[in-house]
Structure formats: structure tokens, C-alpha cells
Image: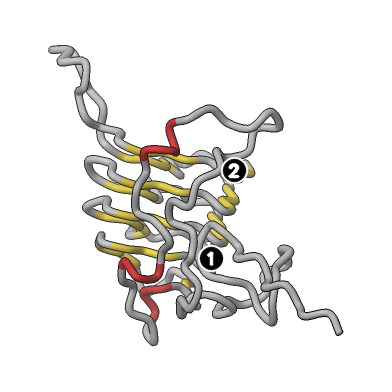
Amino acid sequence: MLTKSINLYVIGFNIWKDPDFEGNGVGFKLGEKDGPHVIIRCLVWKNARTGFNIEENTSSVTMYHNTAWKNPRNYKFDDPAPNPHVLRNNISFQGKVAMMEKIDHKNNSWNGGFEVTRDDFISLDDSGMSGPRKPEGGLPDCDFLKLAPGSDFINAGVDVGLAFQGRAPDLGAFETAAAPQKQF
């Protein structure tokens, strides 16, 4: 299953005050022995329990360029699997990351060399994200969780075969547009 540019947020909260509510608070449930998944450029934030959860997937899960913010646990890959799970160029901000030793996770914000701060983002205001999508299905135009100029995550990624601007891919769900070049 290929999943691109999806937003999942505020899952697991009983906003309807329904006595039969059973939401478990997990954003992306990537398992229950469901088969391989590829997750690209997705956002997950403010869920009750977990942003991205492997959920006992015994097939491969590949995650490129995703951003998780303010979930108690942003990434939970703590189940062993006979097939490799691969994570590259992802950001975790204000939430825990749980990775088993056998998970192939390199060049993500939690792998060392980076400190994620609010200054890395243009905006942490998510109010525009609940607006209508563009006619072709794209995200609403807003700066939520987009990298700020000068962020250490710009051009800090590794090439995973997806289009990018600049000398290297950015970490996270949004690729920063290249600065216009002076014309002489």
C-alpha cells in the first residue's frame, strides 16, 4: 500500500462525548500483519497515543520524508519483523521514538547530529490544516510544519529516489523550494 501526503491528527479523543467511543489514539496503523506499506511525505500530530505505529506488521514498511509532532509517541517500531522496515529523512518533534535494534532507521532527526526546535519550522499553528484541500487533493496552503529558512534539516537528507530541490533532500514532509538565483 502506498500512502502519500496524508494528514492524521487529534485521533483518539472523544470530542463527541460518546459513551461507546473506542478510538485508540493511533494515527497511522501500519500493521496487523497487513502486508507492505510505503509512507511518503505524511504528517501526523496531536494524536492521543502514537503517530506512526508498526502494529505487528511482519511485512516491510518503508517511510520516507514524514513529520510527526506532539504525539506522546511519534514513531513506534518496536515489533520484530522478518522483512526489513526502512525509515529515512523523517522528523520527530516533541514526542518519543521507539525503535527496535533491527529496524533500519538512518538519517532521521532522532539518529544524532540534530536537535529539533520550534525554530526549525515556519509555523506550529495547525488551524489552517483543517481547511479544504486543493482541487487536485493537495494540502491547504499554509506554513504548518514547513521548514524555516536556516533550519538544519534543509539539504540534510539522503537521496531515496524522490524529487528534491537543492544539493540534497530535506528531512520531513515538505521539501523547501530552492532560493531564486540572481540573474546577471
Which residue occupies 28% across, 41% down? 47
Quarter that holds the C terminus = bottom right
1 or 2: mark nearer the eye: 2
Residue situated furthest right in the rendering: 184
Determine whether, in the image, residue 95 is placed left or right of residue 33.
left
Residue situated furthest top in the rendering: 19
Q: Position of residue 107 (x, y in %)?
A: 50, 77
Q: Is residue 158 visible?
A: yes
Residue situated furthest front in the rendering: 184
Determine whether, in the image, residue 90 is placed left or right of residue 55.
right
Q: What kind of residue is marked 1?
A: Val
**Neighbours of disc 1 within 10 Å: few (<14), some (14-19), many (20+):** some
Q: What kind of residue is marked 2?
A: Thr
Quarter that holds the N terminus = top right
Q: Position of residue 181 (x, y in %)?
A: 76, 78
Which residue occupies 33% across, 79% down? 115
Helix, strand or loop under label 1 = strand
Q: CA distance from mark 1 to mark 2?
A: 15 Å
Q: Position of residue 156 (x, y in %)?
A: 55, 80
Quickly name the residue at label 2: 3
Q: Nearer the viewer, residue 89 or 176?
A: 176
Determine whether, in the image, residue 161 is placed left or right of residue 47.
right
Quickly name the residue at label 1: 86
- The image's colour scheme reads secondary structure
Q: Which mark is residue 63?
A: none
Determine whether, in the image, residue 89 is placed left or right of residue 112.
right
In the picture, residue 5 is in which quadrant? Answer: top right
Is 47 above or below relative to 85?
above
Name the N-terminal-most of marks 1 and 2: 2
Q: Position of residue 127 (x, y in %)?
A: 36, 38
In the picture, residue 76 is in which quadrant? Answer: bottom left
